[in-house]
């Protein structure tokens, strides 16, 4: 029987300890990452002579876009990267989403490949709010690999 010591839960990590890496450089300050999703389509094939039986075969696997959110900073690298795409200059970057455990050790890494921004969203501004100004960028990529 496994013994538990203190408040450490085995094989479970918190979702707030992560970093984003683009082209080998750690990019600090992202408050949220979403879209770590891949989906495999299925194709239905009817079996001849058995009207009640359908084979479901795997088809194409498509990665979903990754969305990165962070507070507005004094640098414009995300906007500049997106603006280059708008002007027809595609600069693809590969990167990683790195999840850390409670001891700040790398627990899991999702690598994405040949990404470029397809959507940039600026902050929602409201004079009566005390929320920080957040920008987000959506990255289309050519696949995920979990390590």
Image (cartoon, helix red, strand yellow):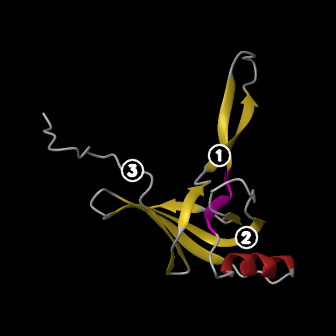
Q: Is residue 140 above or below residue 3?
A: below
From the image, which quarter does the C terminus lie in? bottom left
Q: Residue furthest front?
A: 128
Q: Residue at x 60, y 70 (%)?
A: 113
Mark 2 or mark 3, earlier in chain:
3
Q: Is residue 26 above or below residue 42?
A: below
Mark 1 or mark 3, earlier in chain:
3
In what element is the residue under mark 3? loop
| Residue 18 occupies quadrant | bottom left
Q: Is residue 112 left or right of residue 47?
A: left
Q: Is residue 38 left or right of residue 20?
A: right
Q: Determine whether label 2 and label 1 are within 8 Å by CB.
A: no
Where residue 24 sits: x, y (%)? 50, 81
Mark 2 or mark 1, earlier in chain:
1
Question: What residue would you read off at disc 2?
Answer: 117
Instruction: Give the magenta range.
Output: 61-71
How far apart are the two marked residues, 1 and 3, measured between alpha carbons? 27 Å
How far apart are the two marked residues, 2 and 3, measured between alpha carbons? 28 Å
> Few, some or many C-alpha atoms within 10 Å of disc 2 (few <14, some 14-19, many ≥20)?
many
Where residue 58 sits: x, y (%)? 65, 42
Question: What residue would you read off at disc 1?
Answer: 40
Question: What residue would you read off at disc 3?
Answer: 14
In what element is the residue under mark 2? strand
From the image, which quarter does the N terminus lie in? top left
> Few, some or many C-alpha atoms within 10 Å of disc 1 (few <14, some 14-19, many ≥20)?
few
Q: Which numbered marker is on residue 108?
A: none
| Mark 2 or 3, closer to the camera | 3
| In the image, residue 35 lies in the stretch drawn in magenta | no
Q: Residue furthest right?
A: 87
Where residue 91 sits: x, y (%)? 72, 82
Q: Is residue 61 left or right of residue 88?
A: left
Q: Determine whether label 1 and label 3 are within 8 Å by CB.
A: no
């Amino acid at each position: 029987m496994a013994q538990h010591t203190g408040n450490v839960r085995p094989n479970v990590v918190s979702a707030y300890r992560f970093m984003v890496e683009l082209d080998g450089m750690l990019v600090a300050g992202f408050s949220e990452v979403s879209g770590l999703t891949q989906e495999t389509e299925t194709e239905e094939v009817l079996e001849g002579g058995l009207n009640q039986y359908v084979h479901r075969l795997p088809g194409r696997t498509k990665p979903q876009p990754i969305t990165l959110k962070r507070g507005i900073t004094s640098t414009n690298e995300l906007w500049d990267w997106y603006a280059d795409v708008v002007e027809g200059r595609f600069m693809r970057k590969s990167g990683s989403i790195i999840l850390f455990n409670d001891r700040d050790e790398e627990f899991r890494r999702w690598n994405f490949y040949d990404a470029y921004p397809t959507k940039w969203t600026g902050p929602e501004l409201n004079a009566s709010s005390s929320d920080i100004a957040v920008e987000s960028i959506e990255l289309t990529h050519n696949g995920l690999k979990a390590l």
